[in-house]
Amino acid sequence: MSTEELTANQLRELALLLKHKQAELGSQLEHNRESADPVILDQQSVGRISRMDAIQQQQMSVANREQAASLLKAITSALIRIDSDEYGYCLHCGEPVGFARLQAQPQAPLCLTCQSEREQN
């Protein structure tokens, strides 16, 4: 599948989108830092159901933070590729990733074909 290389305007648009997402995720991670702390189980002040609910919320918060941290790492990697003029090209086959795909997932390191192959294996 032949896809065109990014224009300078498209590259600027995607870079701004990545920087916005990077700032948003950084803020989210900072804001939710305490919600991932271990739950203190004071059996005198809360009931069993409340403790179970608190533990479940803490586990969900930890999972959300891990997912956000992983996405932040991918975004940072994409911004590094922009600075080194490697952004917009598949890391596997070297073909252009495509503007439409990058608009949907600006951190995407692979073209749609290579991503599909990776998911099938």
Image (cartoon, rainbow, N blue to C red):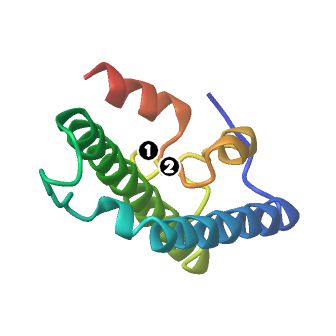
**Residue sitting farthest toward the right:** 9
Q: Amino acid at mark 1?
A: Cys
Which mark's residue is nearer the viewer, 2 or 1? 2
Q: Residues within 10 Å of mark 2 (few under 14, many from 20)?
A: many
Q: What separation in Å lies between label 2 and label 1 (alpha carbons)?
A: 6 Å
Find residue 66 and report its horizontal and vertical position in percent. Answer: 33, 55
Q: Nearer the viewer, residue 31 or 22?
A: 31
The structure residue drawn at horizontal position 45% and vertical position 56%, both measured from the top left corner, is 71
Find residue 77 and report its horizontal and vertical position in percent. Answer: 46, 68
Quadrant for the C terminus, please: top left
Q: Residues within 10 Å of mark 1 (few under 14, many from 20)?
A: few
Q: Are marks 2 and 1 in contact (CB under 8 Å)?
A: yes
Q: Quadrant of residue 118?
A: top left
In this figure, which residue is indicated by the disc labeled 1? 93
Q: Quadrant of residue 115?
A: top left
Q: Secondary structure at mark 2?
A: loop
Relative horizontal placement of residue 62, taking residue 41 as reference (left or right): right
Q: Quadrant of residue 70?
A: bottom left
The structure residue drawn at horizontal position 14% and vertical position 53%, both measured from the top left corner, is 44
The structure residue drawn at horizontal position 64% and vertical position 63%, both measured from the top left corner, is 21
Q: Nearer the viewer, residue 103 or 41?
A: 41
Q: Amino acid at mark 2?
A: Cys
Q: Secondary structure at mark 1?
A: loop
Look at the picture and state if 104 lies above or below 15. Answer: above
**Residue sitting farthest toward the top:** 120
In this figure, which residue is indicated by the disc labeled 2? 90
The structure residue drawn at horizontal position 43% and vertical position 44%, both measured from the top left corner, is 93
